[in-house]
Amino acid sequence: MAKRFLKLTVEPTFGMIRNAKKMYEIIEYANGDLYIKLSGIDNDGQKVFHKKIISKGIVEEIIEHLSKTTINVFLQKQFIYDGDFITLEIDDRKNRAKISLSWISQPPDGWQQLSLVTEKIFSLIPE
C-alpha cells in the first residue's frame, strides 16, 4: 500500500485554461521506494503525468526543513490577486498530524521558508 506524505497543488488564479491544475505528490510505497508524481492539466490544456523514483535523502532534507520551519498562521492581509494559487499539504500519519497551507504566487510574509520546499519539489520534475 502506498502512502502520500506531501502534496503540492498549483492552479492558475484566472486567465488560463479553466481546469489547469498540477499536483506534485511525494509517495512512499510499501517496499520503501519513494516517488514523486506530477499529474494534472497544464496551461495549454494538455494532460501531464510524470513519475520518478527519488532518494530517501531528498525526502529527509524536505522533512528536516519543514520540521525546523516556524510560521504564524494568522497573517496580515496581503493584496496579491495574480499568479498561481499554491496549496501545500503535509500528511504525517505516524504522528496523526495533517496540515494544509495555501497562498497566491509567493508565500506571504513570515512563510518565506516554505518557498525552499516548493522550489525543491518543482526541481525534482522539471517541466
Image (tube, rainbow, N blue to C red):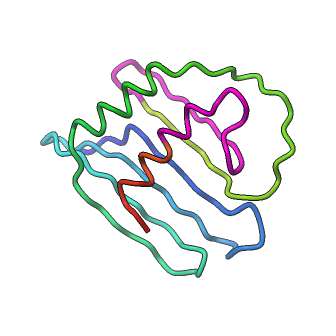
Q: Is residue 48 above or below residue 6?
A: below
Which quarter shows the N terminus? top left
Is residue 120 placed above or below 11 in the rendered structure?
above
User: What percent of the width, then of the height, locates residue 70?
Assistant: 57, 18
Q: Kindly indicate the quadrant of the structure image that contains residue 17.
A: bottom right
* Magenta stretch contains residue 27: no
Which residue is rendered at x = 27% and y = 51% of the image?
A: 35
Identify which residue, 74 or 115, lies in the foreground: 115
Is 15 on the left or on the right of 79, as rendered?
A: left
Locate the C terminus and report the quarter of the image it occupies. Answer: bottom left
Residue 32, position in %: x, y?
16, 39
Using residue 101 as the reference point, say whether residue 75 is left or right of it: right
Judge left or right: residue 59 versus residue 121. Answer: left
Residue drawn at x 33%, y 32% as measured from the top left = 61
Residue at horizontal 63 percent and vertical 60 percent from the top:
11
Question: How many circles with numbers are drawn on the protein?
Answer: 0
Q: Position of residue 66 (x, y in %)?
A: 46, 27
Question: What residue sits 62% from the left and 36% below the top?
Answer: 101
Q: Is residue 20 left or right of residue 73?
A: left
Q: Where residue 126 appears, x then y in whole percent?
A: 40, 63
> Which region is colored magenta?
92-117
| Residue 109 drawn in magenta | yes
For the residue pair 29 and 75, the one nearer the viewer reads as 75
Which residue is most to the left?
31
Q: Which residue is more in the foreground, 64 or 35?
A: 64
